[in-house]
Amino acid sequence: MELNTRQNEILDIVKENGPITGEQIAERLHLARATIRPDLAILTMAGYLDARPRVGYFYSGKKPIQSVADGMVDMTAADFQSRPVVITENLSVYDAICQLFLEDVGTLFVVDQQSLLTGVLSRKDLLRTSIGRTELDKIPVHVIMTRMPNIMYCRKQDTLISVAKKMMDSQIDSLPIINEKEGGLEVIGRITKTNITAAFLSLAEDHDL
């Protein structure tokens, strides 16, 4: 990100005099407060400046890319989770395929009668099973699903960076977000590669990168 002349002048003023209010900065530049408001917003979002209510602006000492990195560390699964699509163990493969396309998702999470996670079904699992078979309505999903302990999952407080790494290492497209309960794991959300991409893109756009 390249700063213009006035933005560099504002940075110099804040470095030397911070914390300093927007009105005081405008006065030193012989400009109206409204004139420099967009510049202050850009410098703040880009990570050059920090602002405190009733205190003013001060130089953060961060480069924009460092500010973005800090933002990524703060992002959690809970902030960007989406609704999980859950099915029961005895649902047929045929009905699971219908559910997958009706919900437009890539993964289904399978639960038992206590609504606790027992398995995961991907598009690949369902495609592999459907090839060459005609009686899909007679095959329950628990026969073909991936079972515990081979299921990767995350918790709502996990950072998106750690979730993304887990997905990449396991070469999967989504993870269930779980809540630990007595006797097992309750599915309370899901995180997909699309969720993570959208989160990181929004952060980059906020910092004008």
Image (cartoon, grey):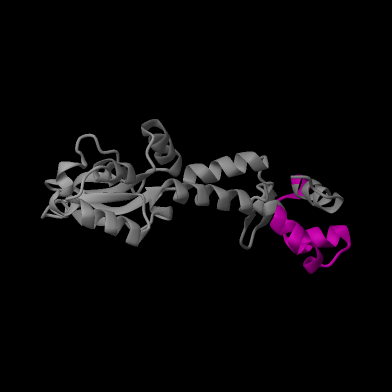
Q: Could one spot residue 86 in this view of the protein?
A: yes
The image position of residue 108, as x and y in percent, is 28, 51
- Can you say whether 61 is above or below 116 in the image? above
In the displayed structure image, the side of residue 174 where residue 181 appears, left or right:
left
- The total of numbered circles placed on residues is 0
**Quick one: 117 or 101, which is closer to the camera?**
101
Q: Residue at x 42, y 34 (%)?
A: 168
Q: Specify the segment rendered in magenta.
A: 15-42
Q: Residue at x 15, y 51 (%)?
A: 89
* Magenta-drawn stretch, dominant element (helix, strand or loop): helix
In the displayed structure image, the side of residue 119 where residue 127 appears, left or right:
right
Q: Quadrant of the N terminus?
A: top right
The image position of residue 194, as x and y in percent, is 46, 49
Q: Could one spot residue 85 in this view of the protein?
A: no
Q: Residue at x 43, y 39 (%)?
A: 164
**Quick one: 94 or 75, which is closer to the camera?**
94
**Quick one: 91 or 76, which is closer to the camera?**
91
- Can you say whether 24 is above or below 127 in the image? below
Q: Residue at x 38, y 58 (%)?
A: 104
The image position of residue 70, as x and y in percent, is 55, 42
Residue 148, image quadrant: top left
